[in-house]
Image: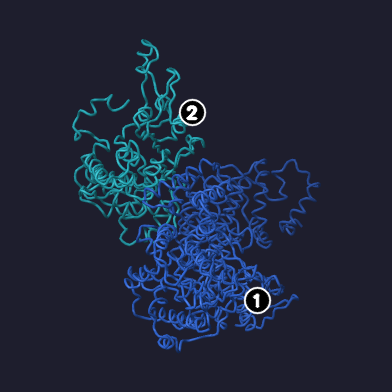
Chain colours: A blue, B cyan
Amino acid sequence: MTAEQPWVEVLGVRHHGPGSARSVAAALEALAPDCVLVEGPADADPVLALAASPDMTPPVALLGYAADAPGTAAFWPFAVFSPEWQAVSYALRHGVRLQLCDLPAAVSLAQREADAGPGPDGDASRDPDGDPHGDPEGDPGPDRAGESLRAQARTDPIALLAHAAGHDDPERWWDDVVESRGAVAAAQAPPSPDGGRAHPALGAFAAVAEAMTVLREAVPTPEGPERDREEQREAHMRQVLRAVLRDGARRVVVVCGAWHVPALTGALPTATADARRLRGLPRRKVVLTWVPWTHSRLAYASGYGAGVESPGWYHHLFTAPDRTVTRWMTRVAGVLRAQDLPVSSAHVIESVRLAEALATLRGRPLAGLAEVTEATRAVLCEGDDVALASVTSALVVGERLGGVPDDAPVVPLMADLRAQARRLRLKPDAAERVLDLDLRTGTDRARSVLLHRLTLLDLPWGVAADGGVRSTGTFRETWALRWTPSLEVAAVEASMWGATVAAAAGERVVATAQGRAGGAADAPGAGRAPTLPGLAALVRSCLLADLPDATDRLLAALADRAARDTDVAHLMAALPGLVEAQRYGDVRQTDTEALGRVADTLLVRICAGLPAAVSALDDDGAAALRTHVEAVHAAVALRAVPQDRDRWLDTLHGLVDRADVHGLLVGRAVRLLRDAGRVDPADAAARLGRALSVGADAPAKAAWVEGFLAGGGLLLVHDADLLALLDRWVRGLREQEFVDVLPLVRRSFGAFEAGERRAVADRVRALPVGAAGGARPGAGAGWPDVDPDRAAAALGTVAAILGLSEALR
Amino acid sequence: MTTTDLPAGDARPQAALLRPHAEQQFAAELAALAAQDAAQGSARPPSWVLSPGAVVTYLLGGTTADGTVVTPKYVGPRRLVEVAVATLATDRALLLLGVPGTAKTWVSEHLAAAVSGDSTLLVQGTSGTAEESIRYGWNYARLLAEGPSPAAIVASPVMTAMADGRIARVEELTRIPSDVQDALITILSEKTLPVPELGTEVQAAKGFNVIATANNRDRGVNELSSALRRRFNTVVLPLPAGEDEEVEIVSRRVEQLGRALELPEVPAAMEEIRRVVTVFRELRSGVTADGRTTLKSPSGTLSTAEAISVVTHGLALSAHFGDGVLRAHDVAAGILGAVVQDPVADRTVWTEYLEAVVRERAGWGDFYRACREVSG
């Protein structure tokens, strides 16, 4: 190349577009530049060299965060199919001068902070950068259709053009239209004036530049801060370009978003005007580093607004050498076979045919993601959306996890953790140390919150210990602290959840609740949604870790799960925990209104489901349900909401007249209703009498009595009628029946306090001797076969147990 | 057993028929689309009456070049229809799956009418369907008199379709006994139907294909063998996606049915229709329309077809026994019957829904009371 005159070639790309990436790689090889400028934060130049490290495997992201507030952070992700990544690797591989040319992160973060105002730290990371390569605005703005069109024109203008042409896969449109047309145009074009630069790949970029010029005229950015920022960014790019030309670069290639191409070519504003535009921009101290990224975080589906919907498909488009659809279908077949779904080669053949037929029907020369997905669904998955979803997550999105070299600077989560530890005077120490916290003091409470959050993040710096002081009250906690080097690694892994401890813990908890915490960086075994009681436990952890946002989202998940759970016992197990959490939350001054609402709906569901759940239970089932009924009853009392209480008591009342309900539950329900004043004592006595009458067999009666008497015998002390009824029943039992019910009755009475038992026995003694007669110990009349001498020893013992020793003496 | 064997059906005027075939009812639209294809020179697969693009337009509705309005036959995702048509064009058989009431048969009839101009080559699958209905039978009088001969063969709809290069339809494929289903395998893979008694075979002409429908709720009745399954491309027809879409489908069908059954006119009761559709959608999807409350789903399907029958039933009640206006209590009993199929589990679901959702909803007081009344 005999270029005396320095030249600049601007390659307008689609961010994360494999077609663009391939074209960029080809163009760079053909042009052999001596300087490459890439759209990206200019102050990241120092860490850029790390990209050459063999340990650096995309997907990775450049991460910039404010040194004093790690929550203010922005990410610039790169995949292997990102054109920017291709440009960076080309430059590093060939030792070509490489520079990033967008506004420095120091400026864009300061600007964003100025826009957003001082928000709570941690929120910023959940709302990452809107445009992957520069525009630091998280939210594209008002929701008007025209506005969203304009926003798309700026962030992904090529997709906009593809959609206008009727393609829903912009990458296939690029292959079909941009590359093939571009190649044709370049072949037909007369030799370009500046020598041998007419390469087929360049034709594509010329076509894009032309389209963008038209598009920028048709859809101009409206006046306002957004326009200002765009102009500042482009001014900065031009200034960097001028600087490298001044430094003697002769063959310069600029790789930037297609939207910016017209601003860097043709007639440019003067350097003075650009310098004026860049004067006085806010700045703050930022740290830039690389972090590992994942394909699923690149994907739109994970809430990362600037991402691509199908990184796995793009990766395939970029890496597959030929026969893209056939290779893709073969990989899909592999995924399905790994799940033991029978997929033959004939299936693959038919799916490829269907994808191509569909493309023809839709008038597209190449099958895109939409067509291959339809073909996968109709042929390989036999219409099954569940199987298709597994293909989507495994291939279309993909689970690829990137890696960064060990010498990359520290992640913001770790910085935040260290800052908090310093503030709370917790020193990382390899030796174990026991820490007693008094939650009534501010510092200790903050420490407890931090340690709880770290536990949620699988960063077990502190382990909650059952210290001796624990039982003395809920305001004390004991932790065993021990810092291990593995925590540093865990922190890097946990940083995928957020930039601050609070944000990451919240995000992680919500992910666990939704059963999607099974990311590559995660503990094995995670990834399945927890059970209902498990969710209730998570809510409690959230309250301890003071994560109100996550608590709200958890409660929503809990309400969802409660609605789907058909097992009333699960619902009943979850309710008491929630009600207690509400009371506990009151102590910690958290907003518990939402908790209350969820508890209300749980109760409605319990009341609706209980009548069906109590029928036809065996002894064990009834015993299990009885504990749940008691727990719910206690929780309803604790909540003290009149209409809830009425609803619950109505439900219980609906049980007591049914014949198909286990006696234990009926007895319990009658007792609870009697204590609550819903059933008057006379009625309760009548029910006891009915339950003990001839209709039922003895064990059923005993179960009824057990349910009725559970939880204290004082009732018998004070209600003589009930006691008399019981007494009559016991005395009326035949010998075999007595043997049968003895263990059950013994169990009922055994649960009473010793004092209660004695009081009951006293009352029994005071009862008038009934007609059946002879029940009084020692009377002898009704016991003709008793040998008084031999019985005396046993009688003494029995009397001692019953507290009747006085009477015998 | 083609329609030509039954001249009585063709002789009567269309208006007297309870239900004309698709190609009869929409003959004008089909002709307009064919004319458009001819004018634009669109490529047609062999033996097809219309081009694939025109078939898609026929099903989803549109306007032809000469201004004829094509009514939508199927309201649903475009991609499903495109996959179905592309499948028929690749000579793979098409299997339409869906819960009852998702217009599987309807779509299959219209696809056959648009592709080959004939939707009557139909095998209705039942547990008693014999192999003769899929292959061929014999005219026994002739067989005894003349011995085996082509004239003694009674061709099945599938055989006729193969000979003529048309679409054969198999309804309720999974209800057909497995051994009879297997008769389809040779037909679909070899595209031929041997007649060993005569030492001949019927080879399928270009354009032959099979559209089968099956209900994926009772998949277990006679599960398709994987050998047969892999000869089909599967399209699952979903329940309607949006509330407005479903209200539209229900009210349109209710109006048509009301006319066919000659019910007295009842003022259009959009409010009650919307309510029925809302209840069905919420219970079916397991979440309230505002997305705030999750619900259990009952065991029944709660398809659009059932919503249509609930509303029609309510209309009949109000027209014959009520004041002629569709009110909450006219539809309440129908809804209860549709929702509570399993007396224990579904009743719990229904009670939960009534107490947690209906009771709280503003303006639904009359509906709540009516439902409480019939729920007992």
Q: Residue A561 location in percent, x, y?
A: 50, 58
What residue type is disc 2 on? Asp
Work out whether A690 lies above or below A630.
above
For mark 1, what is the residue?
A: A476
Instruction: Bin the neighbour count of mark 2 within 10 Å (Cα to Cα): few under 14, some 14-19, many 20 and up.
Output: few
Quadrant of image for the N terminus of chain B: top left
What residue type is disc 1 on? Arg
Which residue appears at 64% of the width and 55% of the height?
A764
Q: Residue furthest front?
A: A2
Q: Residue A357 location in percent, x, y?
A: 41, 46
Q: CA distance from mark 2 to mark 1?
A: 73 Å
User: Tag 1's secondary structure?
Assistant: strand
As rendered, which of A673 and B357 lies closer to the eye?
B357
Work out whether A553 lies above or below B246.
below
For mark 2, what is the residue?
A: B179
User: Tag 2's secondary structure?
Assistant: helix
Q: Is residue A400 left or right of residue B154?
A: right
As rendered, which of A674 and A610 lies closer to the eye?
A610
Q: Is residue A789 left or right of residue B148?
A: right
